Image (tube, grey):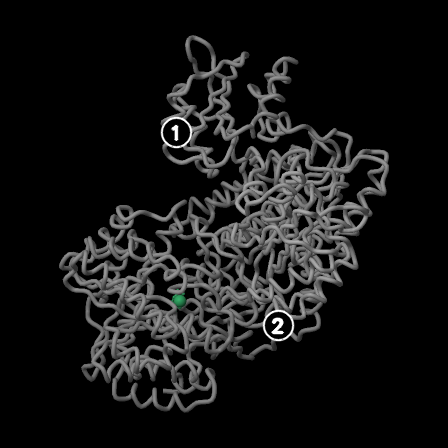
């Protein structure tokens, strides 16, 4: 985010005209390394297109879109002209602000400047300023706006007394980042003010970071001083920010509208009462902004000019924010929205102009407001339908796999399944936008929600797997999310059909979550869309496909979370998907359910006729279409053998994994939280080979402190009772950001600030983590490894931090290691092996980076096979380097679970295989059936193959 600092401002300069100002600014930007020399032309071109005068003595010169390539890095530089410079049309500029931005980091700054514009005396004050600090204070001193949104309102809270209600109100302010923990105690001591009709007001200005107002109402009225309490406003007071809302509240109370708060059943009612109401007969239209730099000055100008052409009021707001919005005719107000690409703008207009104005504004925004725009990823229902239609027509073009043929794909979940195909392609959903009356539509929606919730409940009741249950319970919670329902209710009241109201609001909520660049929220957004489609299908009367009477093979494009609801293990014998890889969602769900699965088989499987007999071999990633009797019998026998093998493996899970010729391999388990350690040991794991500590960080709203982390680590160490624990330090960033650690959006998150790169930016977090680990390890064996190390500098920096902490917190049995996930680390293994105590190869990432295939890519991830000879070569190099220096090597990626990969990894000399708890017994048994000498020969042959499929064929042939 760009900020204004005194050092960026040159004071007391003179210029004859604005062209001279542009030269001065361009030179300053180039001298400071922000732009390349040609940028002046781009600034001139921009000025020729449109004046960059902002108002109140300020101009914001910047380059055109074509000049974007000349930007080296983002920054802002300011020059102060006390005599003023004529900017055309008699406008005087005292402060020229050059902003160069590579992405949308400047929007916050524009927001600040436009807020400052509302200060009438700003121009004069800038004219008279003599100190850079005064200018900073003038620009930043604009009053902060009061935070008041739906997150700050809770209705019908179950509380025992007034104090508890105060605590709830204060907690909302804390959650919203308005106050710190000390505020709660201080608010408790403040004197409550009775507003009448059961409403109360409580405010405090200590420990406030941002002004905010929360409102809470009790489920059952409580009492204070023998008076009823039906609602409480809690103010985090900072300056005068709350004044307009307080005045409005007083007006409403005087007019006798206290019931809008005390009787409120929806958060929207409260918000609209406080923030102004959009008249009921105003039409609205929503449109998503696609401009890559958001609603910055140029598109905002185009938009305001277009709106000014209509004789009537037009308002616009971010759909995700409450309130009346701002006038679409005001450039400064539009800039003040700070709208980013992907955010939804909601326009409303008075009836006399609504039809024409809304259509024109929508089209203009869609066309980019004078800028070329990259289309947004599509999520809306019509777009989904288009994609489905596309998929359908392509399946029609595709040839059905022929009877008797064999298909190879990715082995995602072990076991053999035989049964008729149930091919499920998403239905095309059609519905009217307008409803048949609010009550009727509400009833239809309630019925659909109830039906879907009941479907889910049936599966929840039968479900044994915690992972899957959690997903389902979350889906149920989504169905009754009050915030979603408030907004839907408003749409139904405006005449929308249940389908339209539901899908627009679900889409808006999902977009909001996606726009936060948070991997966990993005996952929740996918879940929300998924449950949204389920309800929509129910509203459109689309019945689920009729299941065959016997156990069947489900054939789908990808297993979506909602498919889990219909995945009855008694009924679904196997899964075959067109897309996805071994680390995709579908694979994880199938493994959790213990259903044999083959994924990423290509779109042609969707063209299979319903009921086609299929044989799915989840051990070898093989599918047979309509197998003949002989193939069937053979498969049945293999299944029998495989099941017996699994039972035997489990019975012998405590035996060590030693090859027939006496070579031992340690088999450990991967865990994500302390609660999984027990199951891991129970399943025969000889150690924890990978503890993914990021989950501890992601499950907290703030970075967990040392004591919280210690509790987690101690629990695992206690469970292990002397067995080694390999902990990976915090591996976040890139595709899995932490909400409380905001980072600029990256074009290629997998190639960005991830893993150790991120930890080294905030070494205090790494130190706290290490201190927590060392404190509870005592004499127990602790191995700590750093993720995503790319070279010696990163390793040494991380190691030195660990050694410094160790000097303060002694730990007896400690090894420091490196995760080999980046090809450069594997290629440098002989250097790193001199210094590190061990390596653990993260084959998921190592494969992704070696083959340049995004591990989550829906189409390509199936090709990201860790048995590619290039990846095997890197593993070989890593192991040889480590052993030459007497160090050990583990593999903790998914490849260690792969039955075909195990002999090769063992043959390459890997000392430890770390896999999911469910796979421990099977991998141990697999090692016990191998001959190490043969494995070594096989590994050498594999290194000489030309592709992953050739390697697989080689192993399967023996
Ligand atoms: C890996 O990359 O193989 C690994 C184990 O780490 P993660 O899957 O957590 O990125
Ligand atoms: Mg990794």
Q: Mark 2 points at which residue?
A: 604
Residue 657 shown left or right of residue 84 in the figure? left
**Picture residue at 36% right of the left edge, 79% below the top:** 826
Residue 910 shown left or right of residue 567 in the figure? left
Q: Is residue 379 visible?
A: yes
Horizontal and vertical percent position of residue 541: 67, 45
Q: Is residue 61 above or below residue 619?
A: above
Q: Name the residue under label 1.
A: 184
**Picture residue at 69% right of the left edge, 50% below the top:** 59
Location of ligand 2 given as a quarter of the image: bottom left
Q: In this view, does 805 lie above or below 4?
A: below
Give the residue at the far top of this rendering. Answer: 226
Q: In this view, does 226 lie above or below 114?
A: above
**Decide: marks 2, 1 in contact (CB < 8 A)?**
no
Q: Is residue 651 visible?
A: no
- Say which quadrant the C terminus sits in: bottom left
Quarter where residue 350 is shown: top right
Residue 917 shown left or right of residue 53 in the figure? left
- Under circle 1, the secondary element is helix
* Labelled disc at residue 570: none
Is the CB of the residue bearing disc 1 within 8 angstroms of ligand 1? no
Q: How far apart are marks 2 and 1 (CA)?
A: 60 Å
Of residues 791 and 619, the one nearer the viewer is 791
Of residues 107 and 927, the one nearer the viewer is 107
Specify which label sits upstream in the sequence, 2 or 1. Answer: 1
Horizontal and vertical percent position of residue 450: 56, 37
Numbered-mark total: 2
């Amino acid at each position: 985010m760009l900020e204004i600092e005194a050092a960026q401002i040159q004071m007391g300069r003179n210029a004859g005209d604005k062209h001279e100002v542009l030269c001065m600014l361009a030179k300053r930007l180039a001298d400071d390394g922000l732009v390349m020399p040609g940028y002046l032309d781009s600034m001139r071109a921009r000025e020729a297109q449109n004046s960059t005068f902002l108002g109140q003595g300020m101009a914001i010169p910047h380059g055109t879109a074509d000049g974007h390539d000349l930007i080296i890095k983002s920054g802002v530089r300011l020059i102060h002209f006390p005599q003023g410079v004529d900017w055309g049309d008699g406008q005087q500029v005292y402060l020229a602000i050059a902003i160069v931005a590579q992405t949308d980091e400047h929007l916050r700054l524009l927001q600040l400047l436009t807020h400052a514009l509302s200060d009438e005396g700003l121009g004069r004050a800038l004219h008279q300023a003599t100190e850079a600090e005064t200018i900073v204070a003038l620009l930043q001193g604009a009053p902060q706006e009061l935070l008041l949104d739906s997150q700050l309102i809770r209705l019908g809270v179950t509380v025992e007394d007034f104090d508890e209600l105060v605590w709830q109100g204060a907690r909302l302010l804390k959650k919203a980042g308005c106050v710190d923990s000390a505020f709660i105690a201080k608010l408790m001591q403040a004197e409550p003010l009775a507003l009448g009709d059961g409403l109360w007001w409580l405010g405090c200005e200590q420990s406030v970071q941002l002004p905010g107002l929360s409102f809470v109402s009790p489920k059952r009225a409580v009492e204070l001083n023998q008076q009823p309490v039906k609602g409480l406003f809690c103010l985090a007071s900072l300056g005068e920010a709350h004044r307009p809302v307080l005045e409005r509240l007083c007006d409403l109370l005087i007019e006798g509208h206290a019931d809008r708060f005390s009787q409120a059943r929806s958060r929207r009612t409260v918000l609209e009462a406080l923030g102004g109401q959009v008249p009921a007969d105003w039409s609205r239209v929503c449109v998503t902004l696609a401009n890559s730099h958001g609603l910055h000055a140029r598109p905002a100008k185009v938009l305001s000019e277009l709106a000014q052409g209509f004789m009537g009021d037009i308002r616009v707001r971010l759909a995700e924010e409450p309130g009346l919005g701002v006038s679409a005719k005001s450039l400064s107000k539009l800039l003040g929205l700070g709208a980013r690409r992907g955010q939804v703008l909601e326009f409303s207009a008075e009836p006399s102009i609504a039809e024409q104005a809304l259509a024109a504004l929508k089209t203009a925004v869609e066309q980019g407001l004078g800028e070329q725009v990259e289309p947004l990823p599509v999520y809306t229902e019509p777009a989904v339908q288009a994609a489905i239609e596309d998929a359908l027509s392509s399946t029609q073009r595709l040839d059905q796999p022929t009877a008797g043929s064999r298909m190879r794909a990715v082995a995602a979940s072990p076991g053999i399944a035989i049964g008729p195909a149930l091919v499920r392609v998403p239905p095309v959903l059609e519905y009217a936008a307008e409803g048949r009356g609010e009550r009727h539509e509400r009833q239809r929606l309630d019925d659909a929600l109830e039906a879907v919730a009941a479907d889910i409940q049936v599966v929840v009741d039968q479900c044994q797997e915690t992972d899957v249950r959690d997903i389902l319970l979350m889906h149920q919670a989504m169905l009754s999310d009050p915030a979603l329902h408030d907004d839907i209710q408003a749409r139904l009241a405006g005449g929308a059909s249940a389908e339209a109201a539901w899908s627009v609001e679900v889409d808006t909520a999902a977009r909001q979550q996606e726009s936060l660049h948070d991997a966990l929220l993005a996952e929740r957004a996918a879940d929300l869309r998924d449950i949204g489609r389920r309800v929509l299908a129910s509203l459109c009367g689309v019945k689920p496909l009729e299941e065959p009477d016997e156990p069947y093979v489900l054939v789908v494009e990808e297993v979506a979370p909602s498919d889990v609801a219909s995945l009855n293990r008694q009924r679904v014998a196997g899964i075959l998907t067109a897309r996805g890889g071994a680390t995709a969602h579908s694979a994880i769900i199938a493994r959790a359910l213990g259903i044999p699965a083959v994924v990423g088989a290509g779109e042609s499987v969707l063209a299979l006729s319903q009921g086609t007999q299929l044989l799915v071999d989840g051990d070898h990633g093989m599918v047979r279409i309509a197998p003949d009797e002989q193939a069937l019998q053979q498969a049945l026998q293999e299944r029998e053998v495989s099941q017996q093998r699994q039972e035997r493996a489990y019975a012998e899970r405590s035996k060590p994994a030693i090859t027939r010729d006496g070579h031992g391999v340690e088999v450990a388990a991967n865990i994500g939280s302390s609660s999984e350690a027990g199951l891991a040991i129970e399943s025969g794991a000889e150690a924890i080979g990978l503890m993914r500590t990021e989950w501890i960080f992601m499950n907290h709203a703030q970075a967990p402190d040392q004591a919280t982390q210690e509790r987690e680590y101690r629990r695992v160490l206690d469970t292990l009772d002397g067995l080694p624990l390999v902990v990976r330090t915090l591996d976040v960033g890139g595709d899995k950001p932490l909400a409380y650690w905001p980072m600029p959006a990256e074009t290629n998150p997998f190639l960005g600030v991830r893993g150790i790169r991120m930890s080294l930016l905030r070494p205090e977090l790494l130190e706290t983590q290490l201190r927590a680990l060392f404190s509870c390890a005592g004499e127990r064996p602790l191995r700590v490894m750093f993720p995503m190390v790319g070279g010696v500098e990163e390793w040494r920096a991380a190691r030195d931090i660990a050694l410094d902490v160790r000097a303060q917190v002694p730990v007896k049995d400690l090894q420091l290691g490196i995760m080999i996930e980046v090809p450069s680390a594997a290629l440098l293994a002989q250097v790193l092996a001199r210094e590190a105590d061990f390596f653990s190869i993260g084959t998921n990432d190592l494969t992704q980076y070696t083959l340049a295939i995004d591990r989550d890519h829906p189409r390509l991830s199936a090709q990201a096979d860790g048995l590619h000879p290039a990846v095997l070569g890197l593993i070989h190099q890593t192991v040889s380097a480590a052993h030459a220096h007497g160090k050990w090597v583990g593999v903790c990626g998914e490849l260690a679970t792969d039955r075909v990969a195990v002999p090769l990894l063992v043959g390459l000399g890997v000392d430890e295989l770390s896999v999911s708890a469910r796979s421990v017994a099977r991998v141990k048994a697999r090692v016990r059936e191998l001959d190490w000498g043969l494995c070594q020969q096989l590994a050498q042959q594999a290194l000489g193959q030309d592709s992953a499929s050739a390697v697989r064929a080689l192993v399967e042939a023996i």
